[in-house]
Image: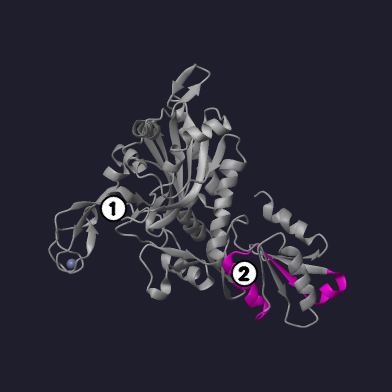
Amino acid sequence: MQEQKTNMDTIVSLCKRRGFIFQGSEIYGGIGGFWDYGPLGVELKNNIKRAWWRAVVQERDDVVGLDAAIIMNPTTWKASGHVDTFADPMVDCKSCKRRFRADQLEGDRCPECGGELTEARMFNLMFKTFVGPVEDDASVAYLRPETAQGIFVNFENVVTTTRKKLPFGIAQIGKAFRNEITPGNFIFRDREFEQMEIEYFVRPGTDEELHRHWVDERLGWYRRHGLSDSNIRVRRLEPEEQAHYAKDTFEIEYLFPMGWSELEGIANRTDYDLGRHAEFSGQPLKYFDDETNEHITPYVIEPSAGVDRSVLAFLFDAYAEEEVRGEKRTVLRLHRALAPIKVAVLPLSRNEALTPTAREVWAKLRKHFMTQYDDAQSIGRRYRRQDEIGTPYCVTVDFDTLEDKAVTVRDRDSMEQERAPIEGLAEMLRNRIEGDG
Ligand SMILES: [Zn+2]
C-alpha cells in the first residue's frame, strides 16, 4: 500500500519550531480544533489564497469575486438544509461524560473508560450565537458552516451588477466553522477553517461537461503548484457517499500520513440551492436566458477547497531530508509562488565593513519581495535555516561585493551559486520567482 513518507509529527514540529502554525491560545492549554498561523504560516497561507484567486478569478473572464458576511440571516440555513440535516449521531458516556460519534465507535461501551453509553442523538455541527442584546430564540444566528451560501444569496445581485452570461462563476475565500466532534490530524480537520469556493452556474444539460472541466482545472492547479502526481488523485464518490443535494461529486485527494484524504470536493449541486433559496425567500432567483428567451434556474458546479488542508498538503509534498556533504539538510521545496520568504539577504559575516552594503541590498529587495535579513551564526547554518523554511534564493554579500558591486545568489534546490550584479538584482530575482515552471 502506498504511504506518505513523512509523518505528521515531523511537520507539526517543523511548523511550531519555525513559526508556521501554533496551537490556538496555547498559553491557556490550547483549545481543540483551533490553530494559529505564525509569521511564516500566514505568508504561506496568503500565497496559496493569492495563487487560487489568480487562477480562478484574475486569469478567467467568467468568474468574479465576492466576500460575504460570516453571519447570515438564519433562514439561510433552513433553506440550505443545515438546520435540519447538518448533524452527526452522538453518544455520551454516562460515567466519564466524554462524547463520541456513534458511527465511529466499535462496540457499545465507552472506549475511554468502558462506561455505559447513552442512546445516539443528532448533534448539529453549526456554532450558535445571538445577534443583538437579547439571548432568545428570535436572535439565534449561526457562524457559517460553509461559504457557499453567501454566494447563492447574492446570485441576483451579481447577475444584475456584472451582466454575466451563463456559464459564469462567483468565487469566495473565507472562514467557516463546524463544531466537529472529533477534530484531528493537525489542521486537517479543525473547527475554524478557511474555504476557497466557486459556485459556477451553468445551463442544465451542460453541467456534466463543465463538471469535468473543473475537475481538470483544479487538479492541474495543485500539480502546477507543486503537488506530485503520486500523492494526488481524483476519486468519484459512490452514490451512497453523495450529499443530499449532489447529482455527482469528485474529490481531489491527497496522500496524507492517515491515508488518502479530501483536499477539495467538486460537486454538481444541480439547481438545489437556488431553488431552495427561491422557495424560502420568495425571490425568483432565475436567470433570463436570451438564447432561448426563457427564465431558467441554472445548475451549479462547486469546486470547494480547504485552505488549511492545502497548506498541509503543500508542506508535506515540499518536505525533504537529504544528505549534503555528510550533513543532514532539511529542505522545503515549496513552489516559488507559495514560499513564505522569497529572498534572504545574508552578509558573509557580521563584519562592520559588510553591514552597510548588505543593508542597502536588503532595502532594495524588500520593496519587491518578502525577505529576511540574517547575520547570526555561520553562513552554512543560515543557508540551512532558509532551506528549512523554503526560501528559494539566498543573496550573500561578501568582501568582493565591496569591490565588484556583485553578490552571490544561491538556489535552494540545486544549491548552485552564481555571481550577479547588485544593479538589476531585483529584476533578475523577480523573473525567476515569477517565471513559469
Ligand atoms: Zn467513559
Q: Residue 386 carries which label?
A: 2
Q: Which of the 4 quarters of the picture holds residue 4? A: bottom left
Q: How far, Cα to Cα, is label 1 from label 2?
A: 54 Å
Can you name the residue that lies furthest to the left here?
A: 116
Can you name the residue that lies furthest to the front here?
A: 133
* 353 relative to 40, above or below: below
Q: Is residue 437 left or right of residue 90?
A: right
Report x, y in % for residue 333: 58, 61
Local packing at callout 1 (Cα closer than 10 Å; few below 14, some 14-19, many 20+) is: few
Q: Which of the 4 quarters of the picture holds residue 322? A: bottom right
**Residue 184 shown in magenta:** no
Q: Which amino acid does label 2 sit on?
A: Gln
**Residue 384 shown in magenta:** yes
Report x, y in % for residue 16: 48, 71
State which tag comes first along the sequence, 1 or 2: 1
* 189 relative to 352, above or below: above
Report x, y in % for residue 291: 53, 18
Magenta residues (range): 376-405
Question: Depth-wise, is mark 1 or mark 2 nearer the camera?
Answer: 1
SS at mark 1 in the image: loop
Q: In which quarter of the image is ligand 1?
A: bottom left
Q: Which of the 4 quarters of the picture holds residue 1? A: bottom left
Q: Which residue is drawn at 81% across and 77% down?
A: 399
The residue that mark 1 highlights is 136
